[in-house]
Amino acid sequence: MKKITLFATLIIALLIMTTSASAVGTDKEYTPVPPSEDTVTALISSIKQENGHLVVQADPIEWYEGDAADRKFKEREPEAAEELGGAPDGYYIVNDDQTLETYEIAPDAKVLMQLYDHDGTYEGMEIQWNEPVSLDKYVAIMNNDKLMDMKSFPYHLTIKDGKVVQIVQQYIP
């Protein structure tokens, strides 16, 4: 009986650790990116040099998680919300306008990644919450879609004085 209880406890702990990894976090655990007036959440379609400046073309989205995701999901998809009991995986994205916006990236922009191809292997794609990477490395990561298309993740873009000063990858399960 003690072995079964211990085994069940370990399984539950493992499930909690793996299911709580649903967005951005500190170096050890998930914490949501707080919404702010100077942050835009977007799907990035391209990143490139243009007229001597690094720019991203991005489709701004509405990002919801937790209770806000459940409310928005219920509002927009009531039948599915009733059947599922809430937003799948604890988040919900609204993208009614798929117009691309162009944002210039500041040369000293801070980039924080959660998950990417570190070494060309699936094993090397471990979650490392808020791992800082250089802007050059970020461009390389975004242009490497061999194992995973990094453009499928939302990014929180902090904009100051018309330039992106911080990019934070939003992990999605």
Image: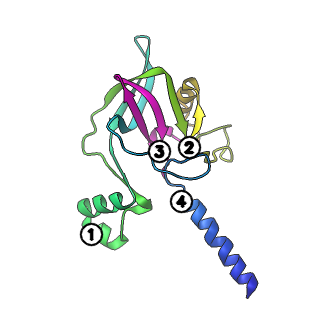
Q: Earlier in the sequence, mark 1 or mark 3?
A: 1
Residue marked by disc 4: 20
- Along the line of sight, which residue is nearer the eye, 38 or 101? 38
Verify CB contact (< 8 Å) between mark 2 and mark 3.
yes
| Kind of residue sitting beneath label 3 | Gln
Specify the amino acid type for callout 1.
Glu
Q: For the residues marked 2 and 4, what is the alpha-carbon distance in whole angstroms?
A: 13 Å
Which mark is in front, 1 or 3? 3
From the viewer's perspective, is residue 107 above or below residue 101?
above
Q: Earlier in the sequence, mark 2 or mark 1?
A: 1
Q: How far from the left and from the top, in percent, is residue 147? A: 59, 41
Residue drawn at (31%, 67%), measured in percent from left and top?
A: 80
Q: Which residue bears the numbered disc 2?
A: 114
Residue labelled with disc 3: 170
Q: Residues within 10 Å of mark 2 (few under 14, many from 20)?
A: many
User: Are there few (<14), some (14-19), or many (20+) residues within 10 Å of tag 3?
Assistant: many
Region of the chain picked out in magenta, as a range:
148-173
Q: Quadrant of the N terminus?
A: bottom right
Which residue is depicted at the point 68% across and 43% down? 124
Disc 4 on helix, strand or loop? loop
> How far is disc 4 from disc 3 in space, using C-alphas?
13 Å
Quarter location, residue 17? bottom right
Using the numbered discs, state the Cα–Cα distance from disc 1 to disc 3 in whole angstroms: 27 Å
